[in-house]
Image (spheres, rainbow, N blue to C red):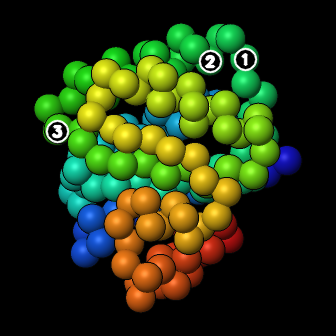
């Protein structure tokens, strides 16, 4: 199965869109986040929408340490991490990823919730209704 990890930073919306597909590991995801953090457009206060509906990584106990290590990495950053993250999921297995991050991410000022619809996720991170179609188009571009 094809593996895709893409993101786009939208400073005008104070938003980061992410798309993950296939068997993406936490270390790989962490590397993508490290690239984001050094991106000149990045701010730790931007909200995040992450589409993991096509993520097929099996959740394992070993991921607990990987997620914990990732959270520790974020805690060491000079940039303040303070935002909302909306994870768009399709299956209960994917929900585990969002919930487990929420459990460990409690050390950060990040509010994480899982959603099954884009509209709910967009509303949670404060995207006005009249801008949601544009954001959805950008998310669709990440999937290509």
Residue with the most extreme right position = 1
Residue nearer the viewer, 42 or 122: 122
For residue 45, above or below residue 103: below
Q: Residue at x 67, y 38 (%)?
A: 95
- At mark 3, the secondary structure is loop
User: Closer to the N terminus: mark 1 or mark 3?
Assistant: 1
Q: Residue at x 55, y 76 (%)?
A: 136
Number of numbered tags placed on the structure image: 3
User: Closer to the N terminus: mark 3 or mark 2?
Assistant: 2
The percent position of residue 132, horizontal first and vertical second, equals 47, 80
* Residue named by callout 1: 60
Give the quadrant of the C terminus.
Answer: bottom right
The percent position of residue 46, horizontal first and vertical second, equals 28, 55
* Residue named by callout 3: 79
How far is disc 3 from disc 2 in space, using C-alphas? 25 Å
Do residues under tags 1 and 3 come within 8 Å of each other at their CB atoms?
no
Q: Residue at x 71, y 39 (%)?
A: 94
Few, some or many residues within 10 Å of mark 1 (<14, 14–19, 20+): few
The percent position of residue 103, horizontal first and vertical second, equals 48, 23
Tell me: 39 left or right of 139: left
Tell me: 135 left or right of 61: left
* Residue named by callout 2: 63
How far is disc 2 from disc 1 in space, using C-alphas? 5 Å
Q: Picture quarter containing residue 106? A: top left
């Amino acid at each position: 199965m094809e593996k895709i990890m893409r993101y786009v930073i939208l400073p005008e919306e104070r938003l980061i869109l992410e798309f993950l597909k296939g068997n993406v590991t936490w270390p790989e995801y962490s590397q993508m986040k490290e690239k984001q953090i050094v991106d000149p457009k990045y701010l730790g206060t931007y909200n995040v929408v992450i589409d993991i509906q096509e993520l097929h990584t099996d959740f394992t106990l070993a991921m607990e340490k990987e997620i914990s290590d990732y959270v520790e990495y974020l805690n060491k950053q000079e940039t303040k991490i303070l935002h909302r993250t909306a994870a768009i999921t399709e299956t209960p297995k994917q929900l585990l990823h969002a919930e487990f991050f929420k459990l460990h991410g409690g050390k950060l000022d990040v509010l994480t919730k899982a959603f099954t619809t884009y509209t709910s996720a967009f509303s949670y991170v404060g995207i006005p209704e009249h801008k949601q179609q544009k954001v959805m188009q950008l998310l669709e571009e990440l999937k290509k």
